[in-house]
Amino acid sequence: MIGFGITDPCFAIAENTNDNTKTFSPLKIKYLAPVYGVEFFLALLGNGFAIWLLVPRGSKKSHAGIIFSLNLAVSDLAYALSLPLLIAYYAMGKNWVFGLALCKVERFLFNCNLYGSIFFITCISANRCLGVVYPFYARGKVESKHAKVASVIVWLIVATISAPVFKFSTIKHELHVTECIGTAVDSMLPTYLPYSLFLAAFGCGLPFVITLFSYIGIARAVCKSHGLESRDKRKVVTMVCIVVALYSISFLPYHILRNLNLANRLKPTSCAWSSYIHSGFQITRGLVALNPCIHPLLYTSVVDNVRARLECCQKHVEKKPEEIRL
């Protein structure tokens, strides 16, 4: 959460006029609380069901696509389980009553989910690229153990780049309420802004470039191929559309507006500019939290395995009446 400090001219106006609308709190309370509530239920159901579908059963090994998708679902479910704290926070008028430790943990989980999602989407995209562009190499060289090692490395990277949140995130007592600061207080902004820029470049920009080139390679291979069935081509097109949409409406706008908002906090300009930037940033926060609801669509990359699991369950249900008659 970005809060305006006493250096912001709009905050000063609010202090002098007792006009709380100048602090932009009503936007957060009216928008984020219901949005997070809807996203919590959708993410909980979607990713819970996805984990049930993707968890390997029996002795059959999972391929790399399933392993990356399973890690993505686990990351999304963990974040969804933290949303009730934010829902209660905004429903109570931005009053954090859960203590400093939970404030830091919640913000840490948000960062882990955000960058874990981005990195695992990149892994899924690169894996799909290998499978489409270099199918013989992928079948002979890319094994499930490689995906497991890559997943552990991703979690370590995500935890490492998210760890500074424990230093910057804190609670602030102001106007009879306690705020849970998601970025940093004003005095630490000069240190926090470079860290935020690093997250934008390494945590979003680099994966975006890798993902983009992966799908360029996939698109070229699909266009040149005459052996792929139309169903397989539709799967690839669906994946491309979903990932491009995620970056276009969520990941990229969030990082751009977050850093613009931080820069504006350091050197405030006009109240109108502050309002536009801050309001736009709050909208992107809701869109970023929507990702765990959309990610189950990415499991179309392993749709054959999902279909097989569902068909297996359907056959099991159909056999029960016969067993009863016996």
Image: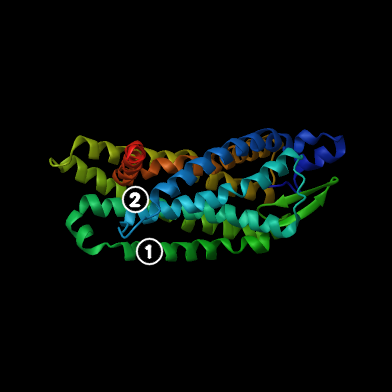
Q: Residue 19 versus residue 16: which sits nearer the camera?
A: 19
Q: Residue 308 versus residue 111: which sits nearer the camera?
A: 308
Residue at x 54% of width, y 39% of height: 287
Q: Which residue is mark 1?
A: 148
Depicted 243 relative to depicted 117: above or below: above
Which quadrant is home to the C terminus?
top left
Identify the element where label 1 is drawn.
Answer: helix
Q: Position of residue 242 (x, y in %)?
A: 39, 39
Mark 1 is surrounded, within 10 Å at the Cα level, by few (under 14), some (14 to 19) or many (20 or more) other residues, namely some
Q: Residue 181 versus residue 263: which sits nearer the camera?
A: 181
Q: Position of residue 201 (x, y in %)?
A: 48, 56
Looking at the image, tell me whether mark 2 or mark 1 is earlier in sequence order. 2
Residue at x 53% of width, y 53% of height: 113
Residue at x 73% of width, y 55% of height: 186
Q: Position of residue 85 (x, y in %)?
A: 68, 47
Identify the element where label 2 is drawn.
Answer: helix
**Quarter residue 300 falls in:** top left
Q: Position of residue 141 (x, y in %)?
A: 23, 64
Q: As shown in the figure, which amino acid type bears the numbered disc 1?
A: Lys
Determine whether, in the image, residue 17 is placed left or right of residue 251: right
Q: As shown in the figure, which amino acid type bears the numbered disc 2?
A: Ser
Q: Which residue ends up furthest to the left in the rendered image?
A: 226
Q: Which dot, 2 or 1, sits closer to the camera?
A: 1
Find the distance from the CA under tag 2 to the CA under tag 1: 16 Å
Mark 2 is surrounded, within 10 Å at the Cα level, by few (under 14), some (14 to 19) or many (20 or more) other residues, namely many
Q: Which residue ends up furthest to the front in the rendered image?
A: 326
For residue 125, the mark is: 2
Residue at x 38% of width, y 52% of height: 209
Q: Tell me, yes or no, if residue 1 can be seen here.
A: no
